[in-house]
Amino acid sequence: MTGTRATFGFKDVEPDEKPRLVRGVFDRVASRYDLMNDLMSAGVHRVWKDMTAARLNPQPGERIVDCAGGTGDIARRLAKLARQAQARRGGEDAEILVVDYNAEMIGVGRERVTEPEIAWTVGDAQRLPLPDASADAYVIAFGIRNVTDIPTALREARRVLKPGGRFLCLEFSRPPAKALRNAYDAYSFSVIPAVGQWVAKDRDSYQYLVESIRRFPDQQTFAAMMETAGFSRVTFTNFTGGVAALHHGWAI
């Protein structure tokens, strides 16, 4: 948010208006969301998500919140790793709860992902339908920049984590190298909306997504926001030269 305003791409809007606008974007792109991710990143997003799931390192019996996880891309990876850990160590099944604000995205996820460890619910990252200290881990991938009030969402993630719980956020970020940053900007603004128009017949939604990346805090700023929300031992790892970054913190 900017003062009492919220960001929607390069525009500032009333906070109560942003959820409706974001919902509209994902209503329109839900059916082509995963295909567009492959096209926009040449499949590299799959590697980033694999590394995120491996860093979270799900274990048997854990309860994991996959926030803004509508199509199940991260949840599916977590379920596979949890089963592998269970085969080695024994123990109870892990539980992975996908929470997403958009019912269309949840619907796509339910159709594509059938792992028994995964449950689905429509919910708000700023008001999670979970009690305090009830989750062992929380992950949000390419979702937090769409939240109206990011500090509130971070505090809510901290609230639902048990002591010792881990928080991971995978998000597009800012390449430190100027040459890469300029090339990435040129690609993002010239190619991604055009591909969105070609594949999803929706240029405006992908123009918003590109703009929302530019409005998102850089790596150091977001790390400081996590610390303010109560996370400890905050670190981040740049992927692909900082095009994306994985932030990691602990609820201690």
Image: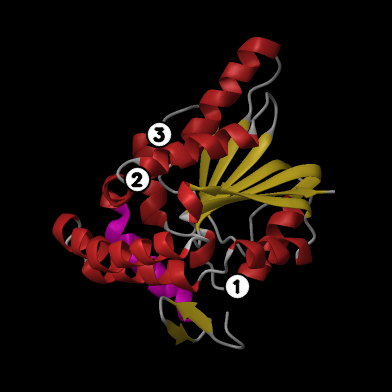
For image coordinates 49% across by 79% down, the residue present is: 7
Amino acid carrying label 1: it is Asp
Q: Which residue is labeled 2 in the image?
A: 108
Classify mark 3: helix, strand or loop: loop
Judge from the rendering whether residue 111 lies leftward or rightward of residue 55; answer left or right.
left
Q: Measure how far apart labels 3 and 1 are at the Cα level.
A: 29 Å
Magenta segment main secondary structure: helix
Looking at the rendered structure, which numbered label has been put on residue 149? 1
Residue closer to the observer: 240 or 61: 240
Q: Measure how far apart labels 3 and 2 are at the Cα level.
A: 9 Å
User: Label 1: few (<14), some or many (≥20) within 10 Å?
Assistant: some
Q: Which residue is labeled 3 in the image?
A: 113
Residue numbers of the magenta segment: 17-30
Looking at the rendered structure, which numbered label has been put on residue 51? none
**Residue 144 place in picture, x, y as percent:** 54, 61
Q: Is residue 235 visible?
A: yes
Amino acid carrying label 3: it is Val
- With respect to residue 124, does 78 lie above or below? above
Q: Are marks 1 and 2 in contact (CB under 8 Å)?
A: no
The mark nearer the N terminus, 3 or 2, is: 2
